[in-house]
Image (cartoon, rainbow, N blue to C red):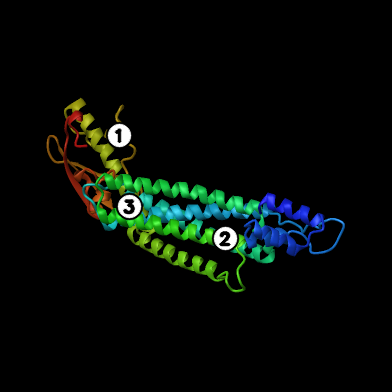
């Protein structure tokens, strides 16, 4: 409420002016009728020696906490949803000329899904508590603290979303596919438009007096329901792409196996350079000083990897893998599959290797 208007109404009432006279004077001065009614409504309509103020709404620490958690969950969910959609777009429209590995990685998708499945339900729950508090005490809608928190958090979100748009334009100017660029812009526009549209509408209800039924009371439920549908679709698509937790664990075990084999190959190269021969066994190799091998046994079965010499410098190294090596280009660019050498099959698979000079290693 305008402080100058509130002060004028108080002084006019104190001097005995009627409410109709105050309304007429302020209307002649081009004040909005809604602002005038709100200013007059702050004082009890009763003759007394001085104007009697109505209790002003006060947003306590508990309500402030609800709003802070509400908007923190909202922004986390919005950003996570955008990240998940960006990864899905990158996967669906592969750009061989411009594919940032981090943007298309399964790890980024898992982080986005993890944030989304926690923050979005928290947002819905906090919004329900806030709406319940407003229904119990409608005067809280006029709280300054509530308005400041709302505008401040919307400002922060505007900065984050603007940064996303700037990054998208940057990548678009860098040559990213037009389809990917336009889809990402559409995602950001949809998220920003829905969030800002809804909350600006909500704030407008504090300042605009509407007829009964004119406040579209079902809009919060529609906003929550539509958001839930889009989030569920994004989570389902994300799980289809990233795979189940069991698949992720098996992939992690395979990456650990490849890492162990890489260490063994390095050790064999160092051993051959030093002694001019291949080691008799992996146990003999790992016992050598200055040869750092994390493990010579499978991380799951704890069985030693198979090692067999097939020539003066040639040898065979085998392991049992849970899955086949990924075939999509984004995953193949990631460690350890960027080397074609380590692309394995599911099950028992062997690699025919040859000791070489450490400076001429194959990675």
Task: Choose mark 2 or mark 3, whichever is in front.
Answer: 2
* Residue 122 percent location from the top left of the image: 54, 58
Tell me if mark 1 has few (under 14), some (14-19) or many (20+) residues whose alpha carbon lies within 10 angstroms of its own: some
Task: Choose mark 3 or mark 1, whichever is in front.
Answer: 3
Q: Which residue is mark 2?
A: 204
Element carrying mark 3: helix
Residue at x-position 46% and y-position 67%: 226
Q: Which residue is mark 3?
A: 251
Mark nearer the N terminus (3 vs 1) = 3
Residue at x-position 24% and y-position 34%: 266
Nearer the observer, 168 or 208: 208
Q: Taking the image as drawn, is residue 173 in sight?
A: yes
Residue farthest to the top?
274
* Residue 162 percent location from the top left of the image: 42, 48
Instruction: Give the image quarter of residue 142.
Output: bottom right
- Left or right: residue 196 compared with residue 332: right
Nearer the observer, 90 or 118: 90
Instruction: Give the image quarter of residue 277.
Output: top left
* Residue 313 percent location from the top left of the image: 14, 35
Residue farthest to the left?
311
Label drawn at residue 286: 1
Quadrant containing the N terminus in the rendered view: bottom right
């Amino acid at each position: 409420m305008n402080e100058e208007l509130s002060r004028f109404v108080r002084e006019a009432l104190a001097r005995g002016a009627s409410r109709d006279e105050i309304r007429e004077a302020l209307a002649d001065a081009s004040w909005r009728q809604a602002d005038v009614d709100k200013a007059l409504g702050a004082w009890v309509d009763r003759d007394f020696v001085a104007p009697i103020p109505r209790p002003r709404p006060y947003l306590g620490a508990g309500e402030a906490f609800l709003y802070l958690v509400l908007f923190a969950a909202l922004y986390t969910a919005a950003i996570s949803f955008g990240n998940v959609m960006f990864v899905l777009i990158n996967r669906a429209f592969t750009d061989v000329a411009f594919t940032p590995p981090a943007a298309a990685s399964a790890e980024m998708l898992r982080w986005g899904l993890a944030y989304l499945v926690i923050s979005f339900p928290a947002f819905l729950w906090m919004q329900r508590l806030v709406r319940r508090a407003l229904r119990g005490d409608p005067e809280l809608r006029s709280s300054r603290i509530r308005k400041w928190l709302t505008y401040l958090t919307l400002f922060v979100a505007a900065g984050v979303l603007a940064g996303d748009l700037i990054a998208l334009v940057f990548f678009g100017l860098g040559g990213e596919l037009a389809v990917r660029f336009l889809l990402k812009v559409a995602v950001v526009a949809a998220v920003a438009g829905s969030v800002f549209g809804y909350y600006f509408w909500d704030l407008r209800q504090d300042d605009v007096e509407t007829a009964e039924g004119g406040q579209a009371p079902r809009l919060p439920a529609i906003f929550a329901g539509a958001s839930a549908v889009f989030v569920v679709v994004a989570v389902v698509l994300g799980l289809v792409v990233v795979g189940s937790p069991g698949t992720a664990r098996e992939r992690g075990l395979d990456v650990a196996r490849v890492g162990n084999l890489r260490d063994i190959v390095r050790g064999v190269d160092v051993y051959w350079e030093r002694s001019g021969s291949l080691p008799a066994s992996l146990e003999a190799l790992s016992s050598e000083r200055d040869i750092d091998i994390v493990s010579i046994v499978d991380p799951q079965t704890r069985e030693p990897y198979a090692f067999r010499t097939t020539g003066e410098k040639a040898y065979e190294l085998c392991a049992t893998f849970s899955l086949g090596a990924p075939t999509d280009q984004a995953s193949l660019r990631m460690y350890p599959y960027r080397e074609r050498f380590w692309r394995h099959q599911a099950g028992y698979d062997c690699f025919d290797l040859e000791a070489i000079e450490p400076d001429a290693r194959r990675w």
